[in-house]
Image: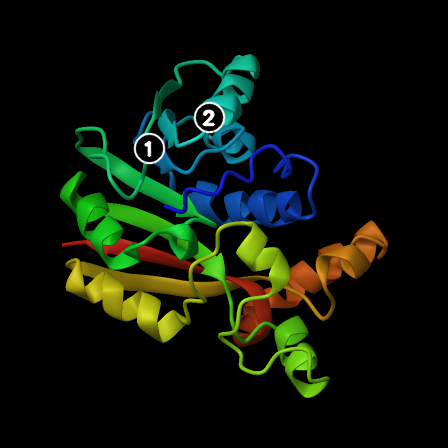
Amino acid sequence: MSSADYTAIYDPDVDFDARYTLATAARIVPHLGAGEHVLEAGAATGLMTAELVAAGARVTAIDRSVGYLERLHARGLPGVVTACRDLDADALPAGPFDHVVATNLLHELDDPAAFLRRAAAVLRPGGRVHVSVPNPTSLHRLVALEMGLLADLHELSARAEGLSTRRMLDHETLAAHARDAGLAVEDRTGVLCKPLPNALMEQLPAAVLDGLDAVSHRVPDLCAMTLMRLRRA
């Protein structure tokens, strides 16, 4: 993972990205069984963790930031085990886990394919990995391309570079990495059809934002985030 530490300037609880986190959680929790063991990689301050625990999961939460993990602890979530890990360099906690949740993470890693192989190795047979990444063909990026603000759909914005993004991962590349890790793609969907940058999206009424998320299943290729559910054989 990049050595650049953005945690002092980025609050995942209040940034517009929190809407992605909660919308993604709403898509993941129906696939969790009560008491199932979940490894959450890149747990940050625990916004997703709280949703997993509320669904009845037992969560092992890992992140590279001690400060974020301290805030996760402060939530007082029952049964959550935490560990500070560099997700590029350090081994994952020993499984087996029923699920690995790695949302809004892989694009920050040096080798996302290697992470998926390690995630598959700590899953029980039939276990699932839930991953989400920013979508290079999101509607707001297509608009930026037409306006000349991006030269290419895989070009990184200044915001992305400031948040340690290494690359944009399209769904075909993500699926190929999954197959190489021995994971089958069970489902691909989108999270939040996003026509505008975050700063402008924040100005929209909540009802409009809810509608833009509700339509996501119809236009996954135009959504801000790609979410995949992967299954180990």
Most foreground residue, 22 or 110:
110
What coloring was used for the rendering?
rainbow
- Residue 86 is situated, as x and y percent measured from the top left of the image, at 32, 35
- Residue 65 is situated, as x and y percent measured from the top left of the image, at 45, 29
In the image, is residue 14 above or below residue 188? above
Residue drawn at x 74%, y 67% as measured from the top left: 196
Most foreground residue, 210 or 142:
142
Q: Which residue is tagged 2?
A: 53
Label 2 element class: helix
Quadrant of the image containing the C terminus: bottom left
Residue drawn at x 66%, y 59% as measured from the top left: 213
Residue drawn at x 23%, y 35% as measured from the top left: 90
User: Badge 1, how many Cα within 10 Å: few under 14, some, many 20+?
Assistant: many
Q: Which mark is residue 38?
A: 1
In the image, is residue 124 above or below residue 106? above
Say left or right for 112 vs 167.
left
